Amino acid sequence: MIFKSIIKHKWIALLSVLSTFLYAGVQLYQPQVMKQILTVISSTSYTRHQMSDKISGYGIELLIVAAIGILGAIVSTLSAARIAQEIGADTREATYKKINTFSYENIEEFNAGNLVVRMTNDVTQVQNLMMMVFQILLRIPVLLIGGIILSITTMPKLWWITVLLVVLIVVVTAVLMGRMGPHFMAFQKLIDRINAIAKQNLRGSRVVKSFVQEGNQIAEFDKTSDDLYGHNWAVGKLFSAMIPLFTIIAQGAIWVAIYFVSTFVTKSPSVAQDSLGGLSTFMTYMGMIMFAIIMGGMMSMFASRGFVSIGRINEVLKTNPAMTFDENAKDESLSGSVKFDHVSFSYPNDKEATLKDISFEIKPGQMVGIVGATGAGKSTLAQLIPRLFDPTEGTVSVGGKDLKTVSRGTLKSNISIVLQKAILFSGTIAGNIKQGKSDATDEEMNRAARIAQAAEFITTKDGQYEAEVEERGNNFSGGQKQRLSITRGVVKNPNVLILDDSTSALDAKSEKLVQEALNKDLKGTTTIIIAQKISSVVHADNILVLDQGKLVGQGTHHELVATNKIYQEIYDTQKAQED
């Protein structure tokens, strides 16, 4: 992904590389000019006028070189920032696009909070890494190799000091980086955990406060935060040792160089003129070598965190969706018939099947109820119809076609599901309703709202359909959120409508009005109602009874009351509660 993004923005990347190399080249050339100036100053063969002219010439050259270096640094910084932002944006968008192709199975495998961290924090780490690569890391090999070559050519007799300096700094850097690596590997996992804890605490704040669990939540957060602090502190201690060690090595190398140069001068005073400028330049190049290795070590440490993030993002990008659609299939209209043919289903990592060998058929336009005890598999069965999951065995057909053979657009236009948990998105009422049909007209929204009994409270809002919806619909009651969810489900007038216990928060009167409206205004629509209360499906054309993942009966209410033991038990229990 990153390589593709660099190719996409190749001209910005090329400008960044060239300007970085230019800046590094200027840094290597400046000491040579300073050497010439010091050589002139220490020379006794020039007159004052000649010395002034030469120093002025070298001074102008130094100013020109410095101006080129400043220009290169500015262009390098701007172009590096631009390419890093471009790569970050491309990676973020590609990751989000990929996540949206995932099925429920993929999302549950990664965990929603984990995916959010990968799309935000990990992308930021990649962006920072790219900034370092184009602005600093590209400059390091030029300074290192150039510094080594020029230091040796400047003072050939001291070549071994350069080699010793490089070896010592590389060894120290490798040891410290090796000890820091595991701490950086732990950072992202701990950030994932902190994000998950905070998100759960904020989303479940009412539960936390109701059961006075603030102390436990804080303790759990503090433990993870302390673990992260421990890793950061360990890295900090290693960092604190790094700079002093490098300084000692560098100062030692400079002392050794001065000692041997003084020895050369003592033995042969004629070399003093060249030694003054050469020693200064030699020490400058040693400083560059040390800087390059130190920065390389530090950047590699930070880069290790970036590479961890790249791996986490690539894991998302390389994950194949558990569910795919036939790209050659054309969008079409399906009749409302639904057929399960020996369908079994197991959730990932579950040893026992949630649904076991279920077969039934629903005719177009029928209203079918699905009842059963909690955990019987009702919601799972419902989610197989709009293909939120694929069956482990058997086939699910709508309109006579296996759902695995139809296009995504066909599923979207023919089937609607109103999930058990009413979820609204921040924005407007109209924006939420139009998720069911993006081009829904005002008339279609009004009709759907009337069917769902949502019009009565929508019309009281300022702006009506343009009224604000807060995050997760917090400014609406549970019943209002369910009615808006039903509105979203019926706005496109689907051929198959699934209501997964989606009237549980409604009072008996409102629920009855919704059912009457569905019978009246959606006569041609096959309606499947999953319900805890038998009273919600008592007038259905057919009722399916599930027990422990098996279909243990089907028929009308009167038939099941007379013949099905499981249904009788549920009915008698609910009837006794009502009495």
Image: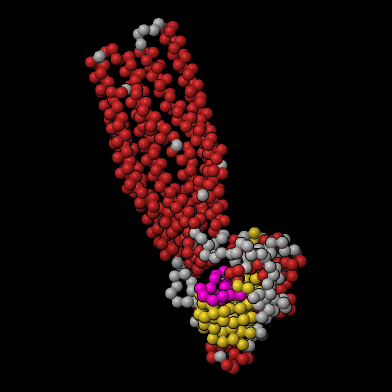
Specify the farthest residue to the bottom. Answer: 562
Residue situated in front as seen by the camera: 416 or 150: 150
Q: Position of residue 564 (x, y in %)?
A: 56, 90
189 versus 456 height, above or below? above
Residue situated in front as seen by the camera: 432 or 343: 343
Residue situated in front as seen by the camera: 323 or 560: 323
The answer to whether any part of residue 111 appears in the image is yes
Q: How many marks?
A: 0
Magenta stretch?
A: 375-398
Q: Position of residue 47 (x, y in %)?
A: 40, 6
Q: Position of residue 490 (x, y in %)?
A: 68, 71
Specify the farthest residue to the right. Answer: 443
**Residue at (55, 48) in percent of width and height:** 89
125 versus 170 height, above or below? below
Identify the image quadrant of residue 576.
bottom right
Residue situated in front as seen by the camera: 406 or 369: 406
**Residue at (70, 60) in percent of width and height:** 466
The answer to whether any part of residue 478 appears in the image is no
Inspect the magenta stretch and tell me whether residue 376 lies in it: yes
Q: What is the quadrant of the C terminus in the image?
A: bottom right
**Residue at (60, 73) in percent of width and height:** 402
**Residue at (26, 16) in percent of width and height:** 265
Relative to residue 466, is residue 206 drawn left or right? Answer: left
Identify the image quadrant of residue 368.
bottom right
Inspect the magenta stretch and tell me whether residue 327 lies in it: no
